Image: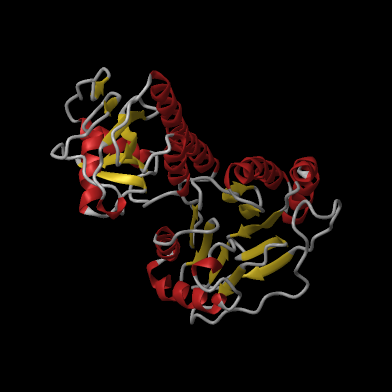
Amino acid sequence: MTSVSFPRQLRPSGAEAIQAQELENLGVLHTGPEERFDRLALLTRQVFDAAGAGIAMQDAGHPFLKSAIGLPSTDSTEARELARTAMAHSGTHVVEAVPPSAGYGVLARQRAIRFYAGQPVISPGGTHVGTLFVVDHRSRTFSERDEKLLAELKWWVERELRHSAELDQAAEVQRKLMPENPPHVPGYEIAATCVPCRGVGGDFFDWYHTDRGLAMTLGDVMGKGIGAAMVMSVACNILRAAGRQYPPAQAVEFADLALREELESTATMITVCHGELDPETHRVRYVDAGHGLMMSMYPDGTVRERPTGMGSLPLGVLPGETRPEVAVQIGPGEIALMFSDGLLDLYDGTVASLEVIAREAYACADRGAQAIVDHFAERARDTVLADDVTVYVIRRVPS
């Protein structure tokens, strides 16, 4: 027997759109080849001692190879034809001796495919979104053991997709920890955004009203991914609780003590800028706990000099550290800008980028605080990020 087909399921109406939406939700589309999938395709080729292996997916009716090991490049016509063949089968499909006219295409260096075995990849939502397959330039038999091996390997592909789904869920929880709508403060525009580099991250921002004015926080947990996100969620809640009760210096001191155990056990630290805006006096009182990435600009775009006496340590470095509180006035048309170090990475990664950031912020200032935030967010989303990017803008409306 040269061909084996295991149960094939009929696709429901609109299946291609469902496939594309599932992959879009999982963050797999439009991301190019990924090392995690290439690693699994390479392992599949090695396990079967075959000439090639790949992972096919489909974007709204357009099959493509997410991974191609020993195969034509993923953007080639041959790769798209092979992806189309792989995605045509919703069940396990094996052809032990591929005839030359069967349309399975070629391997790298134009060698004809004479053997094919594919397993459907199912999304966490139960949709057939891909196929893990192995191919060879010679005919070969496919045993029951081989079938189990291929099924085990495609489970690891599905595990990666589940991991993506879990990251999406964690990202949704993280987004809900940060405020969605800007606060209403007469005479002011306030906007912020956080663009994580891995779906979830360690940056956070916050704002809320107290009986002293508007409390504002920007923090950056050392590290990335799930670990940093877990610390971030604890820190955000503790700083929020402390900020409602205490003025800035005391709130940061309280948070440092409350977070000591978590930061010591995870060997991490958090840089924080936490302050309060009094809209009646137009004064901002704030504490800089090792963050340093903030500036304020006059209406003409000139950057105000930083107050002296800053440069205190991040949370989690020295227990009991006392950090000074600084007060600055915000005049009509002036802008205060806070951001994480990920913003520097969108430029040259050094403090020399501060001048460029100031110029670009000023160029958007006439359109308001949200326009400034949107400008940097768009730049972040158009970049392959190495770190989270968070931007926080306070603008006093010109008189």
Give residue 238's quadrant in the image: top right
In this picture, is 46 found above or below 347?
A: above
Residue name at image x 32 percent, y 49 percent: 71
Q: Give the percent coordinates (x, y) of residue 104.
A: 21, 40
Q: Residue at point 31% right, 45% down?
A: 65
Q: Residue at x 53, y 45 (%)?
A: 200
Image quadrant assignment for residue 61: top left
Q: Is residue 238 visible?
A: yes
Residue nearest the viewer, comparing 289 with 35:
35
Extreme left residue here?
A: 101
The percent position of residue 364, horizontal first and vertical second, equals: 40, 71
In the picture, measured across the screen, residue 176 lies left or right of residue 253, that is left
In the image, taking residue 325 as reference, residue 240 lies left or right, namely left
Tell me residue 106's x, y (percent): 24, 47
- Across and down, in percent, residue 362 comes to 46, 75
Image position of 378 with respect to 59: above or below: below
Q: Nearer the viewer, residue 375 or 322?
A: 375
For this view, does 249 lie left or right of residue 92? right
Q: Is residue 399 visible?
A: no
Along the line of sight, which residue is nearer the eye, 64 or 12?
Answer: 64
Give the mark count: 0
Residue at image location 63% in from the left, 54% down from the top: 219
Image colouring:
secondary structure
Q: Nearer the viewer, residue 319 or 305?
A: 319
Quadrant where the N terminus sits is top left
